[in-house]
Structure formats: structure tokens, C-alpha cells
Image (tube, rainbow, N blue to C red):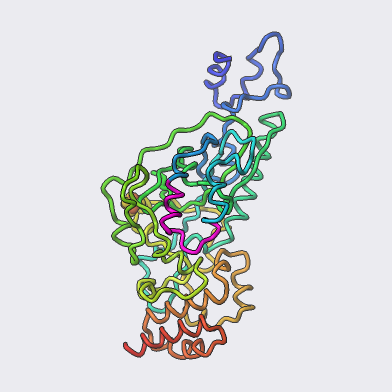
């Protein structure tokens, strides 16, 4: 069998070699020959399904799950209960998601656009929405790509197998498996970074009962760089203090992305000014990363920007109905209308432009106490100015 595999590995498309090979007395035909999982061209199939990156990790429990629990125990998850409830234990083993799983096929989909980075946008009138949220909701895009990938595997494998799609919301240590699958290393900013493609990509996984040859993780290429740590306005990238795991982690309770997306209540006062013009997520730790300085741009229209640097005053005036219409199918709706207006008020207060006074005065009259309080805070900053 080993000789057979070596022979097939020497041709570009293993299936083209069927007619030249005999196993026992049975002549293989395209209909009867199905390659060992090791011979299935996963990356090529994944590329055909729209994924720039793909690799395979073994579906085994990882040492990283211990670091994950330490991270949760330290309180770094803030109020994100989906990270700390019973799903935290589910993350310990991918068999909790698919009992028959043997391999985790990890894919990456580029979403970077040609637009400037947030660190280069000089305007006191515009809001910043995180790059990942400019286009369609990536969950749907990745899920349909992974469904196509599973469909392409079926004729290659030629026998029934189990599979399950995970996109972000499933309790899985997806960056750790993506690293094992060779997609990149986990940077000090905790993003997965690929040496050629940077970190502007979404991750998805196809858990499968098929046993593929695993890929090898790449080396950590952060070196002595600390740009993301130095640039974070809220100092959210914190040292772990050792313990054998990663040196740096994110304290969500200090992270602008957490404040603007996940936090439902008031934003802590000390965090409001450092938020600057961010109203949904934050890109700074990726914008300053040298591995993103030449990051390629996606051609996928799903991620073409529908919400690039919108005008703050216009956002302040939208009704709840308009909010749902404008951000239908967009990740931005996760902030909810109340949280979104809260963020807009803070951003207007930070820009300190006199033209924001009327919309802020309007917001200060809001029946939503969260919006009203943040608008009053912003007006106070305008007053001081
Ligand atoms: Fe690593 Fe530097 Fe990028 Fe931070 S900015 S993730 S330290 S390479």
C-alpha cells in the first residue's frame, strides 16, 4: 500500500493515475477507485470552494484548552457567558461536537479590502466599523463554502462519513486547530497570522470522521515585535505571566471590540475616550501588524464594503427600523440598536465637533437610559472643549 501511495503522490492529480495501478487482481476504474484520505487534495478542493487557506489538524484535545480555562478563570471573558458557561467544557474536545471526529479541516477566507486602515483615517466626522463587518455576515458565507467542500469530498471518498460544520459560534478552539493545521501562528494580538496573507481572514472548520494526514504548524514569527501591544489604546493585550502557554492574551474587559459589540450595559468611563471613533469592533492591533502591510485583497463581493466609515451624525439619527434595514445580513446588528447608539454617542463625544451637539442633545432625551446617559457624557465633553 505504501508503494501505491508513493506512486500516486508523484502525479499532480492522483485520480489520473487510476488506470496505471492495480491492487491485487482488481483493476481500478474512476468509478471504483477512491483515494485514501491522505491523497485527497484538500487545499485544491477548498480553493474551489472559495477558501484561500486550508489544512488539516488531528481532532484531539489540545493543551491550549487548559490555557483557555485559565483565561476564563481570570475573568478575561467579561460578561460573554457563551464563553464561560457549559460550552467552556465542550471546547475541551472536538468529540463533544462530533463523537466520530478524526480530523478537523480548517479553512481561512480572506476578507481584506483595498480601503485604508483605521490608523490612517483622519476625520473627526466619520465612524469606524471593524473591517470584518463591512460586508455580509461571514457565518453564512463560510457555512455555504464548507457545505460545498463536504459535497466535493463525498465523491472523492466514495463511502459514507460523518461531518459537521463549525463557524465561529461552535465551541471549538478554532485558532489553535487552525495553527495545528498550518494556517498560521497565533500572534501576540491573539489573531491567527499567515506569513503570506496576514490576519484578515475568517476561520471555519469541517469536522469529519475521515482520518486525513495532519499538517504541521508554522513557526511563530512575531519575534521581538510589540507593535500591537504598544498601539492598543486600552492596553487590552496583557501578559499572561507564564504558565507554559502563550505569553500574551486579550483581557476582553479592556478591549474596544468587547465594549462596542458584546457589552450590553454602560461602557466604563475610563474606556470611553480611548475608544475614539470606533462604533463596532476595533482593527488597531491588526492595522499596525507588519504582516498585514502587504496583505492581499479579497475578490469576493460578499465582503465588498457596504458600511465603510459612515457619517456619525447620520448614524445618530437612524430609527430602530432603519437600523435593522441598514444592517440586515451584517454582523453589525449584533450590537443591537441600543448598544449601537450608545457607541455612536461615545464616538461623537470623542470627536468633539460642534456639529454633533444637536444630535447629541436629541439622544440625551432618549427613552433608552443607556443611550441618554452616553449622550450626556458626550455633551459634557463638547462643553469642556
Ligand atoms: Fe505579532 Fe507584531 Fe503582529 Fe503583534 S503586531 S501580532 S507582535 S507581528
Q: Along the horizontal axis of the image, is 298 left or right of 236?
A: right
The residue located at (66%, 30%) in the rendering is 156
Whether residue 55 is situated above or below residue 302 in the rendered picture: above
Residue 379, horizontal then vertical, whole percent = 41, 87
Q: In which quarter of the image is the C terminus?
A: bottom left
Residue 125 horizontal side relative to residue 155, left or right? left
Residue 19 screen position, x and y as percent: 66, 17
Residue found farthest to the top:
25
Residue 70 magenta-drawn?
yes
Q: Is residue 229 depicted above or below 323 in this figure?
A: above
Q: Specify the quadrant of the image occupied by residue 300.
A: bottom right
Q: Quadrant of the N terminus?
A: top right
Question: Which residue lies at the image location 57% right of the left edge and 66% below the top edge?
Answer: 334
Q: Which of 305 and 339 is in front in this view?
A: 339
Magenta stretch?
67-83
Q: Residue 2: x percent and y percent?
A: 55, 15
Please tell me which residue lies in front, 365 or 251.
251
Residue 290 shows in the view: no
Measuring 45% from the left and 81% from the top, which residue is drawn there? 374
Question: How many discs appear?
Answer: 0
- 273 up-or-down from 236: above or below: below
284 drawn magenta: no
Q: Along the line of sight, which residue is nearer the eye, 180 or 132? A: 180
User: Would residue 229 be visible to someone looking at this image?
Assistant: yes
Amino acid at each position: 500500500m505504501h508503494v501505491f501511495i508513493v506512486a500516486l503522490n508523484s502525479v499532480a492529480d492522483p485520480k489520473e493515475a487510476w488506470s496505471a495501478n492495480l491492487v491485487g487482481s482488481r483493476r481500478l476504474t474512476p468509478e471504483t477507485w477512491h483515494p485514501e484520505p491522505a491523497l485527497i487534495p484538500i487545499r485544491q478542493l477548498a480553493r474551489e470552494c472559495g477558501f484561500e487557506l486550508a489544512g488539516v489538524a488531528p481532532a484531539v484535545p489540545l493543551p491550549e484548552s487548559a490555557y483557555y480555562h485559565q483565561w476564563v478563570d481570570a475573568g478575561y471573558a467579561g460578561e460573554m457567558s457563551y464563553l464561560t458557561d457549559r460550552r467552556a467544557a465542550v471546547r475541551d474536545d472536538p468529540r463533544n461536537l462530533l463523537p466520530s471526529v478524526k480530523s478537523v479541516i480548517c479553512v481561512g477566507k480572506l476578507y481584506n479590502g483595498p480601503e485604508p486602515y483605521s490608523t490612517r483615517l483622519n476625520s473627526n466626522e466619520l465612524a469606524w466599523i471593524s473591517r470584518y463587518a463591512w460586508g455580509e455576515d461571514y457565518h453564512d458565507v463560510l457555512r455555504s463554502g464548507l457545505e460545498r467542500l463536504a459535497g466535493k469530498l463525498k465523491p472523492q471518498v466514495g463511502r459514507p462519513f460523518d461531518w459537521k460544520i463549525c463557524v465561529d459560534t461552535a465551541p471549538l478552539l478554532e485558532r489553535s486547530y487552525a495553527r495545528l493545521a498550518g494556517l498560521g501562528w497565533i500572534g501576540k494580538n491573539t489573531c491567527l497570522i499567515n506569513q503570506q496573507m496576514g490576519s484578515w481572514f475568517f476561520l471555519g472548520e469541517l469536522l469529519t470522521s475521515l482520518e486525513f494526514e495532519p499538517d504541521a504548524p508554522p513557526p511563530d514569527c512575531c519575534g521581538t515585535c510589540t507593535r500591537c501591544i504598544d498601539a492598543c489604546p486600552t492596553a487590552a493585550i496583557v501578559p499572561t505571566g507564564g504558565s507554559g502557554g502563550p505569553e500574551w492574551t486579550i483581557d476582553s474587559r479592556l478591549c474596544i471590540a468587547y465594549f462596542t459589540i458584546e457589552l450590553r450595559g454602560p461602557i466604563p468611563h475610563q474606556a470611553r475616550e480611548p475608544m475614539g471613533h470606533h462604533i463596532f469592533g476595533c482593527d488597531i492591533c491588526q492595522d499596525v501588524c507588519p504582516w498585514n502591510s502587504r496583505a492581499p485583497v479579497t475578490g469576493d463581493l460578499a465582503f465588498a464594503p457596504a458600511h465603510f466609515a459612515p457619517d456619525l451624525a447620520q448614524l445618530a439619527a437612524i430609527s430602530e427600523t432603519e437600523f435593522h434595514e441598514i444592517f440586515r445580513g451584517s454582523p453589525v446588528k449584533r450590537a443591537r440598536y441600543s448598544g449601537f447608539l450608545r457607541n455612536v454617542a461615545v464616538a461623537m463625544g470623542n470627536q468633539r465637533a460642534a456639529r454633533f451637539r444637536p444630535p447629541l442633545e436629541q439622544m440625551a432625551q432618549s427613552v433608552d437610559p443607556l443611550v441618554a446617559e452616553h449622550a450626556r457624557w458626550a455633551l459634557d465633553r463638547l462643553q469642556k472643549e
